């Protein structure tokens, strides 16, 4: 049985939080080899996740488009982090 959209969004948020290094020190995030501003991307994604956590807590039910958009954003930012050497692929 597939999870409902609220559960799927919670699972996606948890997966993104595990995969993206939000706690990385600024000195490590901002290096000479930069393909996009990792710090700004981390801040943006963290704000998106916090917003969805707040909305879910308030009882909002995401639709499939919301889940797909967040997943796409998470994948794109993960790829930038990977290019900048901040994540190790599983």
Image (cartoon, rainbow, N blue to C red):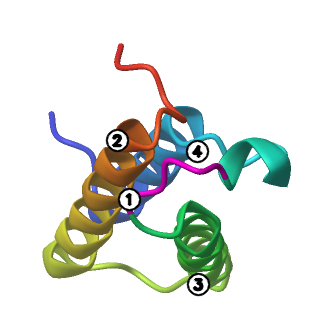
Q: CA distance from mark 1 to mark 4?
A: 21 Å
Image-quadrant location for residue 40: bottom right
**Magenta stretch in the rendered image:** 31-35
Residue position marked by numbered label 4 in the rendering? 17
Q: Residues within 10 Å of mark 1 (few under 14, many from 20)?
A: few
Name the one closer to the observer, 58 or 84. Answer: 84
Mark 1 in CB contact with mark 4 (< 8 angstroms): no
**Residue picked out by circle 1:** 35
Q: CA distance from mark 3 to mark 4?
A: 17 Å
Left or right: residue 75 versus residue 85 is left
Quadrant for the C terminus in the image? top left
| Between discs 3 and 2, the one toward the N terminus | 3
Q: Nearer the viewer, mark 1 or mark 4?
A: 1
Which residue is located at x 68 percent, y 55 percent? 30
Residue at 38% across, 37% down: 82
Residue 56 position by quadrant: bottom right
Answer left or right for 90 relative to 37. Answer: left
Residue 63, percent from left and from top: 22, 79
Q: Earlier in the sequence, mark 1 or mark 2?
A: 1
Residue 2 position in % (x across, y down): 17, 40
Q: Which residue is mark 2?
A: 83
Rendered residue at 64%/79% (across/down): 47
Above or below — where is 39 with respect to 86?
A: below
Which is nearer the N-term, disc 1 or disc 4?
Answer: 4
Q: Earlier in the sequence, mark 3 or mark 4?
A: 4
Element carrying mark 4: helix
Counting residues from the N terminus, which is met first, the one under dot 1 or under dot 3? Answer: 1
């Amino acid at each position: 049985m597939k999870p409902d959209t609220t559960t799927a969004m919670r699972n996606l948020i948890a997966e993104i939080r595990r995969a993206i290094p939000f706690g990385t020190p600024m000195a490590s995030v901002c290096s000479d080899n930069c393909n996009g501003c990792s710090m700004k991307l981390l801040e943006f994604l963290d704000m998106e996740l916090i917003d969805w956590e707040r909305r879910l807590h308030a009882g909002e039910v995401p639709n499939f488009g919301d889940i797909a958009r967040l997943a796409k954003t998470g994948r794109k930012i993960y790829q930038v982090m990977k290019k900048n050497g901040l994540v190790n692929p599983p």
